[in-house]
Image: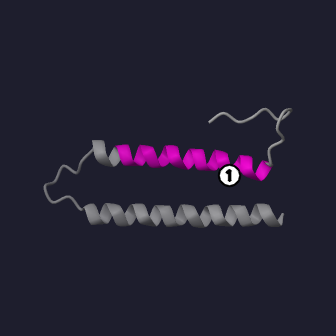
Amino acid sequence: MAFPTPSLHPVDPEFLAWARTNQRQKRLKAALSAQLISHPDPFDSGDVAGQVQAWAKRQAQARRLQASAMAHLRHS
């Protein structure tokens, strides 16, 4: 994602931080998905439900951290 040059279009620093974080999260999610898909569980009875729950917990934690960071930015 190419960001506009600051001289032509002033960008809000909060938006820029969000955009970079969002881009990083998308890359991490793609890497995680690729790892789950390309490295299947070697056991026949793979625990897919456990993997989904672990992923959901990680996502919930990431959302809480993002909300906390955004609230901190707004109130600082």
The residue at which mark 1 appears reads as 18
Residue at the location (82% across, 38% down)?
Answer: 9
Q: Residue furthest right?
A: 7
Q: Position of residue 3 (x, y in %)?
A: 71, 36
Residue at the location (41% across, 48% down)?
Answer: 32
Q: Position of residue 65 (x, y in %)?
A: 61, 63
The one of 39 and 26 positioned closer to us in this rendering:
26
Label 1 residue SS:
helix
Q: Is residue 22 magenta?
A: yes
Q: Which residues are magenta?
A: 13-34
Please give left or right for residue 32 compared with residue 6 in the image: left
Report the amino acid beneath label 1: Trp
Q: Is residue 32 magenta?
A: yes
The one of 5 and 63 positioned closer to us in this rendering:
5
Q: Position of residue 41 (x, y in %)?
A: 22, 51
The part of the image, by quadrant, that contains residue 7 is top right
Q: Position of residue 46 (x, y in %)?
A: 20, 58
Q: What is the chief secondary structure element of the magenta stretch?
A: helix
Q: Quadrant of the C terminus?
A: bottom right
From what the image shows, is residue 37 above or below residue 61?
above
Query: Coloured how?
Result: one colour
